[in-house]
Image (cartoon, coloured by chain):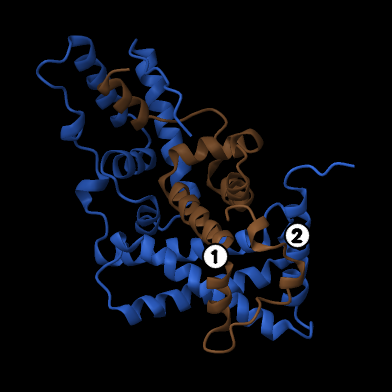
Chain colours: A blue, B brown
Amino acid sequence: VTTEPGETDRVTHDAEARLWVEQLRSGHPRHEEAVGKLHGVLVRVAFDEFSRRRGQLGARAGPEYDDLAQQAADGALMNILRKLDEFRGLSRFTTWAFRFVISEVASKVARDAWRRQPPSRDELVWGELPDWLTPRPGERLEQREQLKVLSAAIGELSDRQREVFVAIALNDVPIDVLALQLDSNRAEMYKNLFDARRALRKGLAAAGHAVVEESASP
Amino acid sequence: MTGRRRQLDELLRAKEGDAGCTAGLEILDAYVDRELAGKDPAREFPGTAIHLQSCPGCKADHDGLLEAARRWLVNPQRFAAAAAGAGDPGPLLALEAHRPHEGDRPGT
């Protein structure tokens, strides 16, 4: 009998995951210990992730990072314990658990950015194409016409689609910051952005200026 | 493809089959573990692969999760120490007996 590559790892991961899930359940003799250890790991992951995203955070002293990491780990731990039954074993338990703390960090970073510098009106309201997209003197008439059609098509989007497209696609407002500004969430913002992009592609194609889709690298 | 065409293609990227944020987030851990195992996650989760090309928020989460999971694989002792806090940096849970030798682990 041969062993498929990776099978030993999978068995090991299953055993690890089973232990985590069992011991994290309330009532298990090692519950408190397991919760404490997972929390410690989550604090470490949160600290690393805040550090990775520090460019989006305002200037902070070291202890403030520690405090933020503790808060993110607290929030993640609560969600993990609440959703323990939803763990399906499609990944290592730890990778699944880390997902929650990464999400907490992303949310805290966005809130910090939004408090310090909420999107300005100019970043949300459609006026004209940004400089980097405006026609250049040497460009062919066809390209200039294409941008003119695009500009008109942006004006024809629904109010929400236009607001989201202008903010995220044209002005680089972070999607989670925009979600806070508009009292929404990332998924809804992305749906608006996706629909706006589809409508604009359609509008350009209808006017004879279709944008050929490039296969993006993964 | 010219620079302008590329700019427009990226600006208007909306590919068929995009799984969206919610569906993508639900399997991000499985996606990342496939990557760390040297597999192509796009084969198993094509909708998420497309989504990660277009959604800056989910892409940032993916990158953070990939880095955290990789660190876990490469240096679990660092996490065990964090888990133990100021106390005895013993094994993380009662897991050591179930783990293969460190050298057998992927990423080491």
User: Measured along the vertical axis of the image, is residue A83 above or below residue A151?
Assistant: below
Image spot of residue A143 (x, y percent): 23, 15
Q: Is residue A151 left or right of residue A198?
A: left
Q: Is residue A110 above or below residue A71?
A: above
- Residue B102 image point, x, y percent: 64, 62
**Which residue position is annotated with label 1?**
B75
Residue A152's quadrant in the figure?
A: top left
The quarter of the rendered structure image containing the C terminus of chain B is bottom right
- Residue A216 makes an appearance in the image: yes
| Chain of the residue under label 2 | A
Point out the image quarter for the N terminus of chain B.
top left
Disc 1, SS: loop
Q: Amino acid at mark 2?
A: Thr
Residue A115: percent from the left, percent from the top?
29, 67
Q: Residue at x 58, y 45 (%)?
A: B35
Whether residue A79 sits left or right of residue A29 in the image: it is left
